[in-house]
Amino acid sequence: MIKSMTAFAKASHTKTCIDTNASITADVTIRSYNSRHLDFAIHLPEACQSFEEEIKKRIAKTHDRGRIEIRLNFTDDSQDSEFFEVDEVKARGYYLALSRVKDSLTLSSDISLDNILTARNIIIPAQKQIDTDLLGEVVLEAVEMAARELDLMRRREGENLFQDLSSRMDHIQGCMEILTKEADKIPGIYKNRLMERIAKLTTDAEGIDPVRLAQEVAVLSDKSDVSEEIVRLASHISLFREVMDAKDSQGRKLNFLIQEFNREFNTIGSKAGNAVLSHMVVDLKSELEKIREQVQNIE
């Protein structure tokens, strides 16, 4: 089953430590984009930096290709998570500085608390000791939840791609049947063209050796024969469908097959003996380009 490389997922997980009553919630969002390889762009809070490699390992369990962008935040809901500290030394120093300014300028107004609080970093959040083990459990579980959701979304989008590509392969296969019939007309077309040229160059076209004429027509027909290309295209169509039905998503293989399709279409186009065949090749190449754009999204 094919999987898309473009998807979005998010997850949230909360866990509380029974002993300390510390409660931590991790929120994760994951976006995936097209990429030739498995690439990561991970944005983590400083307290979670040590989990980065483990996060990559867990994502890689369900994803083989794509650029994976992860954003994670956490909140600590424990009772002491919003404590603040007062820098008394800085506050006292600032107060003394204000007093000197007051005395120097002979000011009558009093120094208030608001005056002191204008100094930066007098009151700052307390540096709380985070339970690293609990944080790791919460973060990694949230990441796995989001990764599973992302994989599900990629599979759903893959089903849509499968339906679209199957329909386009049906169109190509139908065109190949018409193309085969048109290719069978090529020997007769070249024979008529050769007879017309001979008639222009000689006055006795009927006196031409029929055996020699047949030989010339055979040579021209052989140069314009597209039967091998048609057989290979039939094989490519069959293999393309097999790869789409395979258990694992194989976007790279489908992309290589697109290149083979294009090579055969170009060869047929260069050998085309009539306008119908030429126009059909243009239509097939246009359809192939649409398939190629879709295949770029497959893992």
Image (cartoon, helix red, strand yellow):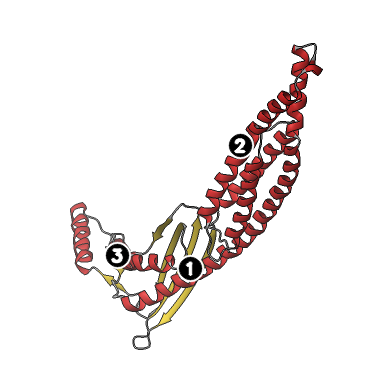
In this rendering, position of residue 287 left or right of residue 31: right
Q: Are marks 3 and 2 in contact (CB under 8 Å)?
A: no
**Does the rendering let one see residue 176?**
yes
- In the rendered view, would you say 144 is above or below 158? below
Query: What quarter of the picture does the N terminus occupy?
Result: bottom right
Residue type marked 3: Ser
Q: Nearer the viewer, residue 188 or 182?
A: 188
Looking at the image, tell me whether mark 1 or mark 3 is earlier in sequence order.
3
Occupied quadrant, residue 153: bottom right
Question: Which numbered dot is residue 112?
Answer: 3
Q: Tell whether 213 sits left or right of 65.
A: right
Determine whether the residue tagged by mark 1 lies in a helix, strand or loop: helix
Q: Amino acid at mark 1?
A: Ala
Residue at image mark 1: 147
User: Taking the image as drawn, is residue 76 in sight?
Assistant: no
Q: What is the distance, in whole Å, between disc 2 and disc 1 at their CAs?
A: 42 Å
Label 3, secondary structure: give it: loop
What residue is pinned by disc 2?
266
Which sits earlier in the primary sequence, circle 2 or circle 1? Answer: 1
Frontmost residue, 6 versus 276: 276
Secondary structure found at label 2: helix
User: Against 10, is 23 above or below?
Assistant: below
